[in-house]
Amino acid sequence: MFLQVWENAQELPRLQNDLADKIAIVTRLVSWKPQDSDLLQRHYNNLKAGNFSQADTVESVIQDLRSMKN
């Protein structure tokens, strides 16, 4: 859901800021599985491209998932 809204919010910086916050919150609260890595990577790429600091939260979860795989 966040991905669809993100794509439609390109010209709405306040909405993107709010979405970035929500993505970070959900990322911290959900118990992710290794198969969720692709979804998280897409969120990370979007946040990183927009220079959102919340990308760090998503990246941390991705790294945790990678360490679980190994």
Image (tube, rainbow, N blue to C red):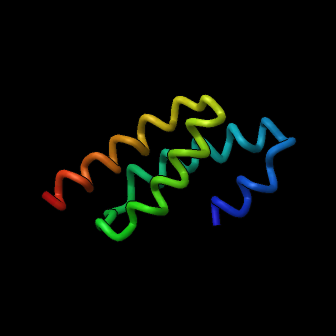
* Image x and y of residue 62, in percent: 34, 50
- Report the residue that reaches farthest toward the bottom: 35
Q: In this view, does 35 lie to the left or right of 38?
A: left
- Report the residue that reaches farthest toward the left: 70
Q: In which quarter of the image is the C terminus?
A: bottom left
Displayed quadrant of residue 37: bottom left
Looking at the picture, does residue 54 appear above or below residue 68? above
Displayed quadrant of residue 59: top left
Front residue of 62/12: it is: 62
Residue at x-position 35% and y-position 70%: 35
* Image x and y of residue 27, in percent: 43, 52
Q: How many marks?
A: 0
Front residue of 65/31: it is: 65
Q: Is residue 4 left or right of residue 59?
A: right
* Image x and y of residue 14, in percent: 78, 37
Front residue of 49/18: it is: 49
Q: In which quarter of the image is the N terminus?
A: bottom right
Residue at x-position 54% and y-position 54%: 42
* Image x and y of residue 19, in percent: 65, 47
Residue at x-position 44% and y-position 62%: 38
Q: Is residue 33 left or right of residue 4?
A: left
